[in-house]
C-alpha cells in the first residue's frame, strides 16, 4: 500500500505540469532542465498521451525513451507523476480492434485522429489498458523519481455500441434483479415499451421521440460504474508493483459523466483540472467553486490541482485569456482551499498538433515573456508555502450536490427544458455564499449534515427517499435548510411523487405542499411581494404549517406563497418556489446566514478580499488572502506573510498574502 504522501516526497507543495518531451528534441530538453530549475518545478506529469510511442505495436513496449526522460528529470530534482496513456489509443489499436471504438447515440463510429477514441466497455480496450498500466508499473513502480501515478486522463467518454449494450444489461440485471422489476422501474407500460427478454434492452440510443427517463438515468449510473471499474483495474494493476499513490485527474466542468463522489473514494489523492471560462472576479469565483467541490469530494482531505491554464484555452475569441497576476491569484485560490500545489497543462506550448494554441508555462515566445516570468514568480511563491502541506480547510455551510439529480435534469420530457442547468444552479448558490465570505463545502443529500449551520439545496429535482429523510432529520436536529424550486419531484426511479411534491419527509420539514408546477417562458418574469423577481419556474404552493414570507403578486399565482419558512424541531426549512434574480437571491442568502448564525471564514476582512483558513492537526493555521479589487487594502492587523517572508500591513491592488496565524 501507499507509503508516503506526495508532499512528503517533494518536501513541500507541488509545482509543475504536464510535460511532453516527446514533442521536442535534445536542445529543448536541455533548456527545459534549466527553465524548470529557474521556475522551481518539482513535479512533472509525463506520458499522458504517449501510448503510440510506449507500445509501437501490440504487445511490444519501448520504454528506452521514457527511461531517459525520467532519469533526466530525476537528476534535475523534478519528481515524476507518471501517467498511463490510455486516454489516447494509437492507430494500430483502431485497426486491430475496430469494435473497441466509440459509437454515438445515432450510430456513428468514431475513428482515430484525435484522442479519447475508445469504448470503455470493449474487452479489447480494457485488456490493452490494463496491460500497459501493468507494464509501466513493473518498470517504474519503485523508481526514486516516482511520486504519483496518474491513471488515464479525465475519464468521460461515453459510448452506445453493442459492447456497451451487453454490459448495460449485466448491470441492469444486478440492479433490478428481474425484467419485471426493470419494466416497473422504467414505467414501460407507457408507449408500449414493455420488455419480454433482456436482449431487447438497449442503451438510450437515438429514438424517434422522447426517450425513457428511467432508462436515461440508469444508463448514466451504469456508465459511471463502468468508468470507476476501468479505473480500478488499472489502479490494481499498478498497486501490484508500486507503493506510490494512484489518482486520476477529475474534470469538474458543466457536465458530468461519472459520479464524482463514488469515484473520489477510489483515489489515493483527489486531483482535478480547472479552466475558468470567464475573466475577472467570475474567474476567481470559478476557482473557488471548483476547489471547494474537489476538496469536498475527498471528504476534506488535502487534494491537488492537476491542471490549469496559464492563459487562453482554445477559443480565445470567446473566452478571454488570464489577466496579469491571475497565474498567482488563481493558483493561490486553489491552495487556499486545500490544494497541495499548483500544476498546469502544459509545461511547454506545443509547436504542432491539436492544442498548438493552448497556453503553457513556457509559451511559443519562450522564457523572455510575461507568462514565463509570472510562472517563475509563482514557483517562488509555492516554494515558500511548504509548511501548509497536510493542512486542511473546512466549510461552515454546505451546498448539496447529487449526480442523480444532475442526470435527472438531463432527460427528455421534463416540465421545462429550462430546468436543465444543474451546474449553473450549483455555481450560483456557491457564488452567493462566496460573495458573503464563507468557505463552502459540498455534500451529497444523503451525507451527515449536522455540522453545517446552513445547507442550500439548489437543484434536487430527483431526491431519494433516504435523502428526503436525511434532510428532514437535519432540520429537526436544528439545521437551517433552503430548498429551491422543483425539488424532490421524482424518486430515484424517476417516478413522480404523488399527493404533492416534494417527497413526504421533505414536505414535513418545509411545511408545504407543491400542488402544480407553473414553468415560465423565456421572456416571462414573475414579481414577488418583496420586490424581487423570478424567472424560469413558479409553482402553486400550499402551506402546511409554514409561514409565508413572500407571495406572488400577479396572475393566477397572485397571493400564493413564493418563499416560505417552517420551524420544525430545532431548525428551519425554507422553500423558494421560483428562480430569483441575482440581487434577490443574494439578499435571501444573506438573510439565511444571519438566521443560521453563519459568518465569513475570516471576520473583519474588507469587501473584495477573499480569505480562507487552512488548519493543521497540531493547531497551526494560515490565512490565504487574495485582493480582487483594484485598490490597496489595509489589513485589520499586521501579520507575517510567507510569500514575502515579512510583516504586511496592506494588500496591494490584486495582491496576495499567506499569513501565518498565531
Ligand atoms: C484538459 C486535458 C488536457 C488539455 C486541457 C486543455 O481537460 O486534460 O489534456 O486538453 O484540457 O485545456
Image: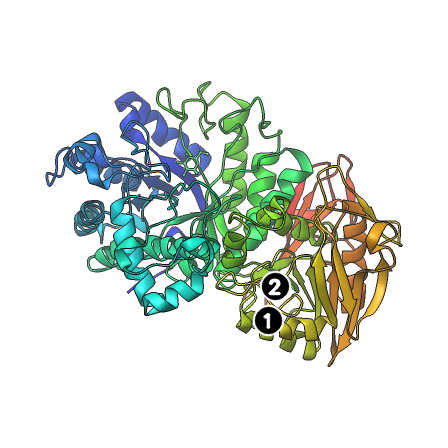
**Residue 367: x percent and y percent?**
46, 23
443 vs 376: above or below: below
**Residue 218: x percent and y percent?**
41, 57
Does 173 sit left or right of 580 as displayed?
left
As helix, strand or loop, the secondary structure at mark 2 comes to loop
Q: Quadrant of the N terminus?
A: bottom left
In the foreground, 277 or 340: 277
Nearest to viewer (mark 2 / mark 1): 2
Does 458 sit left or right of 312 as displayed?
right
Label number found at residue 488: 2
Disc 2 from disc 1: Cα separation: 8 Å
Does 380 sit left or right of 589 as displayed?
left
Q: Earlier in the sequence, mark 2 or mark 1?
A: 1
**Residue 563: x percent and y percent?**
80, 60
As helix, strand or loop, the secondary structure at mark 1 comes to helix
In the foreground, 90 or 60: 90
**Residue 641: x percent and y percent?**
64, 49
Residue that lies at the very extreme toward the front in this rendered image = 192
* Callout 2 touching callout 1 (CB < 8 Å): yes
Residue under circle 1? 468
Q: Residue at x 22, y 45 (%)?
A: 125
Q: Quadrant of the C terminus?
A: bottom right
Q: Residue at x 45, y 43 (%)?
A: 15
Q: Residue at x 56, y 58 (%)?
A: 401
Residue that lies at the very extreme toward the bottom in this rendered image = 569
* Residue at disc 2, CB closer than 8 Å to ligand 1: no
Q: Hey, which quadrant is residue 622 in on the image? A: bottom right
Amino acid at each position: 500500500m501507499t507509503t508516503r504522501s506526495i508532499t512528503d516526497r517533494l518536501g513541500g507543495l507541488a509545482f509543475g505540469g504536464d510535460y511532453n518531451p516527446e514533442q521536442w528534441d535534445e536542445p529543448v530538453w536541455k533548456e527545459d532542465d534549466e527553465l524548470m530549475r529557474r521556475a522551481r518545478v518539482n513535479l512533472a506529469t509525463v506520458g499522458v498521451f504517449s501510448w503510440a510511442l510506449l507500445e509501437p505495436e501490440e504487445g511490444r513496449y519501448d520504454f528506452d525513451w521514457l527511461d531517459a526522460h525520467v532519469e533526466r528529470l530525476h537528476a534535475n530534482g523534478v519528481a515524476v507523476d507518471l501517467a498511463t496513456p490510455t486516454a489516447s489509443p494509437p492507430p494500430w489499436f483502431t485497426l486491430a480492434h475496430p469494435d473497441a471504438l466509440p459509437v454515438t447515440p445515432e450510430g456513428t463510429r468514431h475513428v482515430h485522429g484525435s484522442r479519447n477514441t475508445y469504448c470503455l466497455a470493449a474487452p479489447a480496450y480494457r485488456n490493452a489498458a490494463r496491460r500497459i498500466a501493468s507494464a509501466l508499473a513493473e518498470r517504474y513502480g519503485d523508481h526514486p523519481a516516482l511520486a504519483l501515478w496518474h491513471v488515464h486522463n479525465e475519464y468521460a467518454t461515453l459510448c452506445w455500441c453493442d459492447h456497451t449494450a451487453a454490459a448495460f444489461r449485466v448491470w441492469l440485471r444486478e440492479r433490478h434483479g428481474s425484467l419485471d422489476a426493470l419494466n416497473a422501474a422504467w414505467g414501460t407500460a407507457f408507449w408500449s415499451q414493455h420488455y419480454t427478454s433482456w436482449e431487447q434492452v438497449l442503451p438510450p440510443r437515438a429514438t424517434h421521440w422522447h426517450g425513457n427517463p428511467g432508462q436515461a438515468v440508469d444508463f448514466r449510473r451504469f456508465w459511471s460504474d463502468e468508468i470507476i471499474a476501468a479505473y480500478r483495474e488499472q489502479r490494481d494493476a499498478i498497486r501490484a508493483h508500486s507503493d506510490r499513490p494512484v489518482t486520476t485527474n477529475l474534470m469538474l466542468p458543466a457536465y458530468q459523466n461519472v459520479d464524482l463522489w463514488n469515484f473520489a473514494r477510489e483515489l489515493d489523492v483527489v486531483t482535478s483540472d480547472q479552466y475558468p471560462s470567464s475573466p475577472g472576479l467570475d474567474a476567481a469565483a470559478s476557482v473557488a467553486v471548483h476547489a471547494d467541490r474537489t476538496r469536498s469530494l475527498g471528504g476534506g482531505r488535502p487534494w491537488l490541482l492537476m491542471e490549469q491554464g496559464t492563459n487562453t484555452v482554445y477559443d480565445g475569441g470567446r473566452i478571454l485569456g488570464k489577466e496579469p497576476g491571475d497565474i498567482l491569484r488563481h493558483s493561490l485560490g486553489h491552495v487556499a482551499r486545500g490544494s497541495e500545489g499548483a500544476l498546469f497543462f502544459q509545461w511547454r506550448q506545443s509547436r504542432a498538433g491539436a492544442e498548438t494554441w493552448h497556453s503553457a508555462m513556457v509559451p511559443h515566445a519562450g522564457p523572455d515573456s510575461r507568462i514565463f516570468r509570472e510562472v517563475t514568480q509563482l514557483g517562488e511563491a509555492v516554494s515558500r508555502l511548504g509548511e501548509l502541506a497536510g493542512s486542511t480547510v473546512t466549510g461552515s455551510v454546505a451546498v448539496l450536490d447529487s449526480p442523480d439529480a444532475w442526470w435527472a435534469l438531463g432527460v427528455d420530457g421534463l416540465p421545462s427544458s429550462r430546468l436543465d442547468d444543474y451546474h449553473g444552479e450549483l455555481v450560483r448558490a456557491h457564488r452567493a455564499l462566496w460573495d458573503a465570505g464563507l468557505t463552502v463545502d459540498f455534500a451529497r443529500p444523503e451525507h451527515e449534515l449536522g455540522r453545517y449551520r446552513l445547507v442550500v439545496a439548489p437543484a434536487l429535482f430527483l431526491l431519494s427517499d433516504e435523502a428526503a429523510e436525511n434532510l428532514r432529520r437535519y432540520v429537526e436536529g436544528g439545521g437551517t435548510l433552503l430548498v429551491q424550486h422543483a425539488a424532490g419531484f421524482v424518486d430515484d426511479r424517476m417516478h413522480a411523487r404523488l399527493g404533492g411534491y416534494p417527497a413526504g419527509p421533505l414536505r414535513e420539514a418545509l411545511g408545504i405542499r407543491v400542488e402544480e408546477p407553473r414553468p415560465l417562458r423565456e421572456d416571462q418574469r414573475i414579481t414577488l411581494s418583496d420586490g424581487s423577481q423570478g424567472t424560469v419556474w413558479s409553482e402553486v404552493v400550499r402551506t402546511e404549517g409554514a409561514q409565508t414570507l413572500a407571495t406572488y403578486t400577479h396572475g393566477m399565482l397572485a397571493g400564493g406563497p413564493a418563499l416560505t419558512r417552517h420551524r420544525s424541531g430545532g431548525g428551519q426549512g425554507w422553500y423558494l418556489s421560483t428562480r430569483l434574480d441575482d440581487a434577490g437571491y443574494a439578499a435571501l442568502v444573506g438573510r439565511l446566514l444571519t438566521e443560521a448564525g453563519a459568518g465569513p471564514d475570516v471576520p473583519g476582512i474588507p469587501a473584495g478580499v477573499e480569505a480562507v483558513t487552512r488548519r493543521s492537526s497540531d493547531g497551526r493555521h494560515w490565512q490565504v488572502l487574495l485582493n480582487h479589487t483594484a485598490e490597496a487594502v489595509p489589513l485589520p492587523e499586521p501579520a507575517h506573510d510567507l510569500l514575502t517572508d515579512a510583516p504586511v500591513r496592506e494588500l496591494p491592488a490584486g495582491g496576495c498574502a499567506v499569513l501565518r496565524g498565531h
